[in-house]
Image (spheres, rainbow, N blue to C red):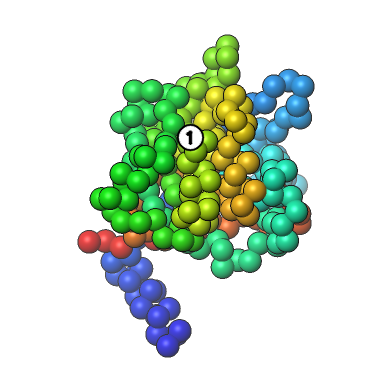
Amino acid sequence: MAENLLAQLLEALAKGSIRVVDLTQPLNAATPVIQLPAEFGQSRPFRLEEISRYDERGPAWYWNNFSCGEHTGTHFDAPVHWVTGKDYPGNAADSIPPKRFLAPACVIDVSAKAGEDPDFLLTRAHVETWELQYGRIEAGSWVLMRTGWSRKSAPDFLNIQNDGAHVPGPHPELIPFLAKERDVIGFGSEAVGTDAGQAFRFDPPFPCHHGMHGSNKFGLASLTNLEELPPKGAMVIAAPLKIVNGSGSPCRVLALVENG
């Protein structure tokens, strides 16, 4: 039976009845990195260092060293990333059961509202209105907030002003609703992080990190191409690098979408 199911999937991919959508931003030296106040430790930008390229350093091979913070570009947040999730078993990039890296997606499109207001917050009321049209969010699903933010280039992507960043994200009241009442697997956004730019002012601060990881859930940030996904029906594959005790990592996030 399993072989038959896998064969059907492979056939559907080959015929194009299921297509693969890349939800990942390119990763290079220009990739925006979250900026914290100066008193905190900082994440380094992505850096690529050539080792050899068919030359005297290696005549038949090309390869590079690279370095970056774990939360650079399109990336996965593990529960251990936040203090509220530090005590769960299997809470790091290398110890999360791999079957949890595949999950269905619910895509909530608020791009028009976010385009008008960079501080737009997705609320429980917005989600419940979405559910009236598309059905209840099933347990184990990703909730992906589509804002169009991935189409912005630096410095508008980070949108840092004198009072901090101004980027859309989830309202503090939404996170416990999604984590407890809908039992989602995690929350994803197009911004540099899963929280709103002004979330340091919220109660609790950074409620998505606080609540999702405190519930042993995940985060995905800097997603793109969410407009190519249906509100429901896509399958997301989001696997971090297997960094021992890693708090997350850059990853190639893919979605499987059935063509109508």
Q: Image quadrant for the C terminus?
A: bottom left
Residue at screen point 67% across, 36% down: 47
Which residue is more in the foreground, 39 or 126?
A: 126
Which residue is more in the foreground, 205 or 103?
A: 205
Q: Residue 118 is drawn in which quadrant?
A: top left
In this view, the residue farthest toward the bottom is 1
Image vertical order of residue 131 relative to residue 123, above or below: below
Residue at screen point 39% across, 74% down: 10
Image vertical order of residue 142 relative to residue 157, above or below: below
Q: Is residue 52 visible?
A: no
Q: Amino acid at mark 1?
A: His
**230 sits to left or right of 255:** left
Label 1 residue SS: loop
**42 sits to left or right of 235:** right
Residue 259 locus on image (x, y percent) = 26, 61
Residue at screen point 69% across, 22% down: 37
**82 sits to left or right of 251:** right
Q: Image quadrant for the N terminus?
A: bottom left
Residue 69 locus on image (x, y percent) = 69, 39
Residue 12 locus on image (x, y percent) = 33, 71
Q: Residue 110 is drawn in which quadrant?
A: top left
In this view, the residue farthest toward the left is 260
Residue at the disc numbered 1: 171
Q: Is residue 137 visible?
A: yes
